[in-house]
Amino acid sequence: MKNIKIGFTGSHGVGKTTLARALYDVIKPGIPIIDYSRPTAAAKALGYNSSRDIPQDDKSQWDFQVAAMFEQLRAQNSAGNNSYIIDRTPIDFISYLCYRMPWLKGTEKYELYEKIGLEFTDFDYIFYVPPFGSEIQDNGIRFLSNPEPIGQEILRLMDKNNINYH
């Protein structure tokens, strides 16, 4: 059987992890799930307890997004060429950075970040999870009140780079 890599993409709090776990529950033990903890690991590597503790200044946010995407890439790499389901893709991190710092687009720094992220967006299936129009409940993880701009950035990035998604 061919190895299959499945990724979910979408704004914060739209249900990516819930859907990834539901899919895993249906097909396990055939494909392992790489579950959400990468932003927390990245925050801890930077000396914070969680992503909520990252200061909102541009330098701290840039450092965090770079660290979080590299945690993502490490998680994907740990599976090697084996099958897996993952609850976000590098596209999520790239899109959040565009949302958070739109002035960064077009700079050499951003172009390198985007190129690295897109290089590792080699999923067999990407499922885009759109915002459902209801207010996001703050459960200690989800805290973005308006996910729509990030969702639009995700779609723009996938369309610009001819990335197929469902």
Image (tube, rainbow, N blue to C red):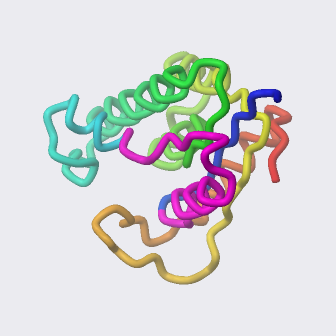
Residue 109 locus on image (x, y percent): 49, 19
User: Hey, which quadrant is residue 39 in on the image?
Assistant: top left
17 in the magenta segment: yes
User: Hey, which quadrant is residue 147 in on the image?
Assistant: bottom right
47 in the magenta segment: no
Q: Nearer the viewer, residue 81 or 139?
A: 81
Is the residue 82 above or below the residue 28 in the image?
Answer: above
User: Hey, which quadrant is residue 143 in on the image?
Assistant: bottom left
- Image quarter (top left, top right, bottom left or bottom right) of the N terminus: top right
Instruction: Write the residue at 66% across / 26% down.
Output: 118
Residue 87 locus on image (x, y percent): 55, 48
The answer to whether residue 40 is seen in the rendering is yes
Q: In the rendered view, does 124 fall on the left or right side of 38?
A: right
Instruction: Write the residue at 80% across / 32% down.
Output: 161
Residue 64 locus on image (x, y percent): 33, 35
Q: In the rendered view, does 12 fall on the left or right side of 151?
A: left
Q: Nearer the viewer, residue 71 or 104?
A: 71
Q: In the rendered view, does 83 fall on the left or right side of 51?
A: right
Instruction: Write the residue at 20% across / 36% down.
Output: 44
Instruction: Write the residue at 50% across / 25% down.
Output: 73
Extent of the magenta region: 13-38
